[in-house]
Amino acid sequence: MANLFVIADYGTSSVVIGLHARDMAGAKRAISWQRQGGFKMPMYICRYEPENQVFVSIASEDKTFHQEAGKRFSPERGAFTESAWLDFWRSLNPMREGTPLWYFFKSYTGAALWSSSDDDGTPLDNGRDDSDIAPETLAQMQQDCERFYWANSEHIHCDGAPVANDMDGSIAARESAMAGHDFWLTRCGHGAGFWDGDWPEPAATALDNAAKAFGNVDLYVGDDGQIYA
């Protein structure tokens, strides 16, 4: 089964060798090709753990590729283009309930509803939820969340990242929920967000700048009762 990845370990950072999964034979060939090309850094055959969003080395009985099992890697983008890197992470982490990305998205839409009002000044979360958001608007919100999350995940899950305290879940899920909430508030210029002191530097500034680059969004209720942007 093609569910393995080769990670090159540079000590202070790591990169993935090729943005596609391999079977064991393919992973070993990839390492052999890198060795023939003169690359001497440690390389590990890994499986991806979506619940933790890390690559974890597996045991190998092949003496040629003997490696330590259980090493964990969060590789950098390296020489890959931003769009290719985003597509890679999307393929590894489809939007599904319970993942950190899902918590990010749900918190984002929640913040969007409670911070927006209808023509009568009633908050949009009063008697409504994200099922009332028009499909095309919800799809655009999801796309924005995916783009922001995967471009900034190292800052969202940095050391000292704040966590949402009004929910259960893993640390990664609660960090993601906090970030989704602050992404909406920051991009729309509300009185709180990544800049208000909860996030450590340099993550706070990086996330603040990235969110503002997405620009403001205004929500409204259409004649059909659905919520549009």
Image: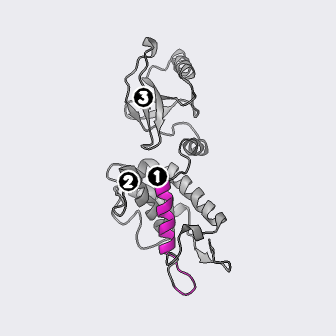
Residue 15 in percent (x, y) is at 48, 33
Q: Tag 2's secondary structure?
A: loop
Against 178, is 118 above or below? below
Residue 228 in percent (x, y) is at 63, 72
Query: Which of labels 1 and 3 is toward the front?
Result: 1
- Pointer 2 with pointer 1, Cβ within 8 A: yes
Query: Which of labels 3 and 2 is toward the front?
Result: 2
Residue type for callout 2: Gly
- In the picture of the structure, the residue carrying the numbered disc 2 is 169
Q: Quadrant of residue 165?
A: bottom left
- In the picture of the structure, the residue carrying the numbered disc 1 is 98
Tally of numbered tags:
3
Residue type for callout 1: Gly
Q: Tag 3's secondary structure?
A: strand
> What span is colored magenta in the figure?
100-121
Q: Main secondary structure of the magenta part?
A: helix
Cα distance between the residues tagged 1 and 3: 24 Å
Q: Residues within 10 Å of mark 1 (few under 14, many from 20)?
A: few
Cα distance between the residues tagged 3 and 2: 25 Å
Residue type for callout 3: Ser
Going from N to C along the chain, the mark reached first, 2 or 1, is: 1
Cα distance between the residues tagged 2 and 1: 8 Å
